[in-house]
Amino acid sequence: MIQRLASLFATVVFGVVLLPVSSAQTPQQIEQFKQLPLEQQRQLLEQYRQGSAVTVKEPKPTEPTTVIPTDAPPAPAPPVRDAETGLPMFGYDLFAGVPTTFAPVTDIPIPVDFRMGPGDMVVVQLFGKVVGNYTLAVNRDGAINFPELGPITVIGLTFDEMRKLLQERVTQQMIGVTASISLGELRSIRVFVLGEAERPGSYTVSSLSTITNALFVSGGVRKIGSLRNIQLKRQGRLIRTLDLYDLLLRGDTSDDARLQPGDVIFIPPAGTQVGIRGEVRRAAVYEVRGPANVGDLIGIAGGLLPAAYPQRASLSRINEARERVIEDLDLQTTQDRARKLRAGDLITVPSVLERIEKVVRLEGHVLRPGPVEFRAGMRLTDLIRSLDELKPMPDARYVLIRRELGPDRRVVAVSADLEAALRERRGPADVALMARDQVRVFDLSGSRPDVGALVNELRIQASLDQAAPEVRVSGRVRAPGVYPLEPGMRVSALLRAGGQLTESAYVTEAEVTRYEVVNGEYREIGLLKIDLAAIRSGSAGADLALQPYDFLNVRAVTDWREQATVAVQGEVRFPGSYPIRKGETLLSVIGRAGGLTDQAYAHGAVFTRVRLRQREEEQIRQLAERMEADLAMLSLQQAQTQQANDADPGAATMAVGRSLLSDLRRAKPIGRLAMDLPRIMAMGAGNAEDVVVEAGDVLMIPGKMQSVTVLGEVYSPTSLLFQPELDRTGYINLSGGLTRRADAKRVYVVHANGQVSAAGKRGWGGDAGPALRPGDTIVVPADVERMRALPLWSGVTQILYNVAVSVAAVNSF
């Protein structure tokens, strides 16, 4: 007996393994145990049985693994929709995104009516005199091999019956021992899912699985399958019918029966399908059972929404002549709700109109925009009680009201003076409001885009017999533009719409251009003089009544200009910005700035003008476009030459051209006006060369200069200390001399005042060229004639050099 127990400690006997749970035994420890005397082996085994829990495991039957969906969230899937109506098909989304990975069942609660079968695992925990944990498998004979009790038949018993049986056997046959019985891993069963399933076939599922579990494993029900007549068959007999709508709409799982081995789940084709759309809670296509009516369908769809308009519902169906017809429904009547449904019916429930009748809308430059209840006798001051309800800087003199009149809802425009209305509530200026009025308040910025939308509505209503009610104001008003012509509108009202006169307005006289069609044959233009001063003083006779298309033009005061300034910087006594008079000259501005300082270098003065900069930018843009076109032509010629000669002689030329074009596009002209300031100052005020200044002009007077700069094709472009005895050639030599790419015949000098002197007749190395002064720049251009150059290249290089010199002069400040 002891030898058998020793072998039991280390090997597998009859499918049962006995191991101490305190620690796993090594082969050396097992061999040492076998070598002990039998009495010591008996004592050790007794210690393990009494002091340590013992785990007994039986081999699991080789059945398929029981599976359920994992906890991973399913991938989102598009809703299943009906091809004809585009409505979602109710219930079929239940199976959308079915997981493709599964995990063993381990944590599903076991119902008390669960019946035991081969493959189920029984977990037994003993405590008391004997302590141990056992996992016992129900074998193919329907029994478990219980240690010390032998085989016990449990097949066919419910879990509760099996638990009571085992507990009674342990209590009767193992004195002082109590047993706790539970289930471990459960057996798998094979069932069939047939009919209109997504993946019909045979499936292995958990013995706890129900009809819906099997449906999920098979991928769900196809669009043509029924959700309301899913049949469970067992040995050819109909056991249960599952209506998934009970589960989806009421959460009822009473018909979701548990499966047994060999069960067949059959999904027949769908029955009568009808649709409902519009203002219902669940617009979809539904499957109905039996003689369903319209009220049943509305109930399945969750009922009507609050915004539904049931009196104008409609039913689309196919009649006996196989034609689709539309029938009206009043869902508030019992008769229409009781109408029987047919396959293919579609009910449409419209919504109430978005238009709110008894309301006034406040919009625009207000703190609390939105709809306000309309009350009989309501006026503008009832809607806007004070100016505190407006945002900062409102134009309270012009409030525009969009109004709809009559049964045809014709649009008209009405304006109001809110300031006057608040001064005298219920007075003539306090306009009476009507239901559906839209009241808009503007600000003083002069931007009134919403006026254009109203004017467009008025133009749409125009006809041959009724001209579009619109007028225009331009000139010296804050908000020029087109405005609605109101009934009885006069010039003063149009000025109020345009934001009133600006400070530059000529208030003595204005002009109205009037267009009239004579006898329906031609249009005649007339000019009417308007006395603005009389209108401003309140003269009703001078306030002309306006007609459609009248154009009011308010002129500006003679010689009115916005305040213009020029900037004087650098070596002057009082640098800064100076307002200028019309026709004022540069010498006048210099005099106002206190004149030049002792350190001023007048020969290097830089004078820039905004208008010149804009002109130079446009010229450079045009030059770049011309050069780009020439490069395209040269590229085409190069391609033809390369195809004919199998060579590429113009690649270097194209590279240089593209580089020049890139530099040209990046050039930023400054708008410099070259001038000889010492000469102008010597000639005195009033001379012909004294420049008339403009707004935005800038005069920069540098300090004393002591350098001459050499740029371009020399070996070391640099700035050199001015030496009176050196001429242009001397400075070029000090810069390393000309490179091989230099064009010695086109060397030129950009003087400090911006004027340019060309090379001497004999070029570099010949005569001395122009006299040099401090601040001058000698430019040695590249010899572009050596390449297959474009005619513009020479001019482009000169422009780039000149821009660079001008920018450097400005940046020196």
Image (cartoon, grey):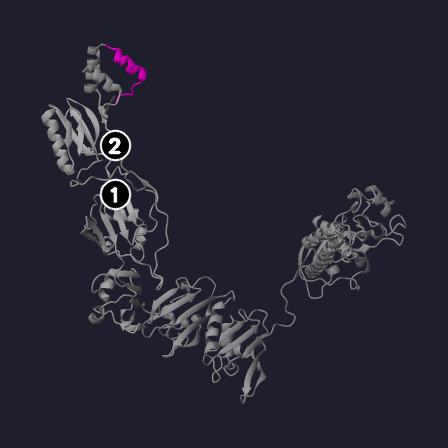
User: What numbered label is drawn on residue 60?
Assistant: 2
Residue 740: image location, x then y, percent = 82, 45
| Residue 542 relative to residue 734: left or right | left
- Dividing the image into 4 quarters, which one contains the N terminus? top left
Helix, strand, or loop for circle 1? strand
Residue 648: image location, x then y, percent = 74, 50
Q: Earlier in the sequence, mark 2 or mark 1?
A: 2
Categorize mark 2 by other alpha carbons within 10 Å: few (<14), some (14-19), many (20+): some
| Residue 659 relative to residue 333: left or right | right
Specify the amino acid type for callout 1: Arg
Specify the amino acid type for callout 2: Lys
| Residue 357 relative to residue 599: left or right | left
Discs 2, 1 touching: Cβ within 8 Å: no
**Count of labels in the image:** 2
Image: 72 above or below 309: above
Residue 318 visible in this rendered orientation of the protein: yes
Residue 530 visible in this rendered orientation of the protein: no
Residue 228: image location, x then y, percent = 24, 56
Hey, which residue is sitting farthest top in the picture?
Answer: 37
Is 26 magenta? The answer is yes
Hey, which residue is sitting farthest bottom in the picture?
Answer: 519
Q: Which residues are magenta?
A: 20-36
Comparing 561 with 351, the one in front is: 351
Helix, strand, or loop for circle 2? loop
Query: Which residue carries the number 1 mark?
Result: 190
Residue at x-position 35% and y-position 49%: 97
Image: 543 above or below 339: below
Categorize mark 1 by other alpha carbons within 10 Å: few (<14), some (14-19), many (20+): some
